[in-house]
Amino acid sequence: MNLNELTIKEARLKLDSGEITALDLTKDCLAQIKKLNPEINAVLTICAESALAAAQIADQKLRAGERGDLLGIPYLCKDIIMTKGIRTTAASKILENYLAPYDATVIKKLTAAGAILLGKTNLDEFAHGASTENSAYGVTKNPLDLKRVPGGSSGGSAAAVAANMCLFALGSDTGGSIRQPASFCGIVGLKPSYGRVSRFGLLSMTSSTDVIGPLAKTAFDAALVLKTISGRDDLDATSAPEANEAYEEKLDAKNLNGLKIGWPKEYFLKDLNPIVWERLKAVAEKLTAAGAQIVKVSLPHTEYGIPVYYLITPSEISSNLARFDGVGWGLNKEEAKNLQDFYKTNRGSGFGPEVKRRVMLGTYALSAGYYDAYYKKAQAVRTLISEDFKKVFQTVDILLTPTTPHPAFKIGEQANDPLAMYLEDIYVTGASLAGLPAISLPAGLVAAGDGQAMPIGAQLIAPRLAEGRLFKVAGVLEKAQF
């Protein structure tokens, strides 16, 4: 096994025993990036020099007897999270040469834990998309089939983990952008509860649903990363004050006796891919064999999740991206006849088509004549969606759903149909709108055409701040074979 193929758990044992060094592990990951990235295009910025220096420091600490969950572990970070002195582009031309003046809180925590930043990963521009085809710096390819997308918007991070370019990666999830690419790439993707992880230093897409979380090879690895990056942050007023847990210990559950798992009928409609349905039934059978009880439940407002999400999200995007005008942020095209022309020139050349589409939708929804009819009503229905989850969690402990309605689609297949692309989020927006933790776990392979079998994911959703429940069930599922 190449060192870059190790899980965090495996690498931890080898690093602590002195069998391998952090420097060797980092060199292996950088070599894998150099080998595969020209074709996959998962990494936008490679920080080889600083990564090797950090690895040497980690080795010094290990030799001195220091230990830590992520000490000496190389990782990659979605290029929408601020990294001091390192280019942070959000995959947009408007930030092409932007150097962040400070580290995001999650980066500070990982650095303090001794994790080694290898570089920044590709994404849909400003996280607007579900395929990582909307990047200003080129499409990212799925390493399992280079003709297919890796999902999005954290497709670069998912592809990098699946291709063993790193041991874990950070992504951001606004309406499924960690879970959907995890499903497409056959890895684990965790969206923590809203507020569990500080958003300070994350370039905002939708401030009311944005969450930073890990993409990893196993649920155990995701648990270690979550424990490191979560917690109250004075720099983020929305961060939760509740204490962290030793999430990785939850995966040691011997059985699921007494646990009730909800099977929401709205997520298993007759037009769901029959093989996806069968894979989810197989997951349910494994959980039942472990002692859990499967209970059919209803989330009656699920059908409104997509329209609500795609009214609230563009509205917040319109507000959040207003600052990128060429004055304080972004491009600065000097030739302009007047201020309005200056704004149009900078934003017109700096933003890509999907960003412009969402800004226009959001500005329209927030306009004086339509605010009550669209944005205000969407927020009211969002409350109903949240109440659905609260009610159902009075009768069950956790929910089991598909992550995506199908496996990864081909690059360009949905390029001319924005509505079809928006529907990719059909199973993941609900948990985001309600601020709930959710995890996507590999659930087997599904025929994807051309004789190719591609992975799909099973999604677990828990009550707010109940990530421990997710990991308890994930531990059982990871022991099962799919």
Image: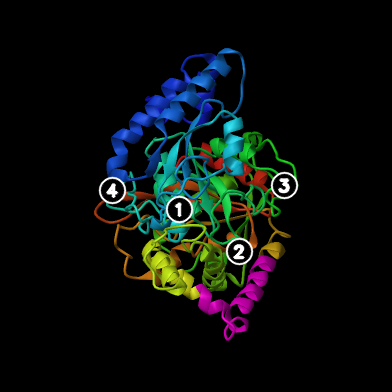
Q: Residue, x 40% and y 59% (percent of image)?
A: 406
Q: Nearer the viewer, residue 391 or 346?
A: 346
**Label 3 near label 1: C-beta < 8 Å?**
no
How much space separates mark 2 and mark 4, taking CA atoms?
Answer: 32 Å
The numbered mark at residue 146 is 4
The numbered mark at residue 234 is 3
Quick check: 414 left or right of 152?
left
Q: Residue 206: x and y, percent?
A: 56, 62
Which segment did they paint magenta? 362-388
Please tell me which of labels 1 and 3 falls first in the chain: 1
Q: Residue, x 33% and y 44% (percent of image)?
A: 143
How much space separates mark 1 and mark 3, taking CA atoms?
Answer: 25 Å
Q: Which residue is mark 2?
A: 433
Please tell me which of labels 1 and 4 falls first in the chain: 1
Amino acid type, label 4: Leu
Q: Is residue 380 magenta?
A: yes
Q: Which residue is mark 1?
A: 90
Please tell me which of labels 2 and 1 falls first in the chain: 1
Can residue 135 be spotted in the picture?
yes
Q: Is residue 25 magenta?
A: no
Q: For residue 424, what is the image quadrant? A: bottom left
The correct choice, above or below, for 19 with respect to 124 in the image is above
How much space separates mark 3 and mark 2, taking CA atoms?
Answer: 24 Å
Question: What count of labels does the image hold?
Answer: 4
Q: Residue 97: x and y, percent?
A: 41, 49
